Image (cartoon, rainbow, N blue to C red):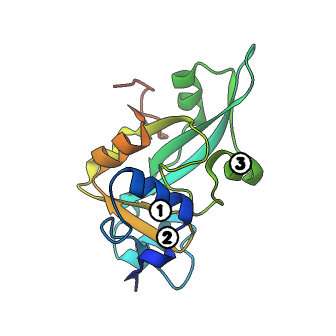
Amino acid sequence: MSTSEPTAVHPLFAGALQEMGLKALEADVRRFPDATRTAAEAAAALGCDVSEIVKSLIFEAVYEKQSNAPVLVLMDGSSRVDVELVRQVLGAQKVRRANADLVRRTTGYAIGGVPPFGHVTRTRVLADRGLLNHPVVWAAAGTPHTVFPMAPDTLIGHAGATLTDVREGTSGGGTA
């Protein structure tokens, strides 16, 4: 069971909502008594399909002649990111999962609560096309206890994401 509680919203995420002209209550931020760090936990708490959960995952792109750069990948909760496809889309030499310190430095949030937007640094964002398979998706709202619903195309727009195919089992990393 969840509740709508504007005071439960992470201050950084609340600031991002305010910049978009929304308040936490208008964004329908839901708070859970127990953490929902995984897509499966969030889906069970909401009573929705795990594919309706948005995973906000930070990776580190390694470039030959540039410094390494974080990248945010937005993926549906039932799929896995194909790091080779991410590497191809980015034109990077290598892509690896970011450690907890890089996630917090890049986003301002801990793993399990990273929202798709409202981060402390601007990073490149890739959104897997599979998110568009649902009229509404649920994403973390800055803590492992909070989530919010949004139409996937609106969420992708707010995140400034490039729409692409980067989930395992897709044929290529084409962008739109």
Residue 78 visible in the picture: no
Mark 3 vs mark 1, CA separation in Å:
18 Å
Badge 3: few (under 14), some or many (20 or more) residues near its Cα, within 10 Å? some
**Could you tell me which residue is drawn at 70 percent across and 44 percent down?**
98
Residue position marked by numbered label 3 in the rendering: 105
The secondary structure type at the circle numbered 2 is: loop
**Could you tell me which residue is drawn at 58 percent across and 68 percent down?**
37
Front residue of this view, candidates 155 and 74: 155
- Quadrant where the N terminus is found in the figure: bottom left
Disc with the residue nearer the chain's start (3 vs 1): 1
Badge 2: few (under 14), some or many (20 or more) residues near its Cα, within 10 Å? many
* Label number found at residue 107: none
Residue 121 visible in the picture: yes
Q: How many numbered callouts? A: 3
The image quarter containing residue 78 is: bottom left
Task: Name above or below for residue 74 compared with residue 34.
Answer: above
As drawn, is 105 to the left or to the right of 6? right
Task: Name above or below for residue 131 compared with residue 123.
Answer: below
> Contact, CB < 8 Å: mark 2 with mark 1?
yes
**Could you tell me which residue is drawn at 55 percent across and 58 percent down?**
12
The secondary structure type at the circle numbered 1 is: helix
* Label number found at residue 14: 1
Residue position marked by numbered label 2 in the rendering: 9
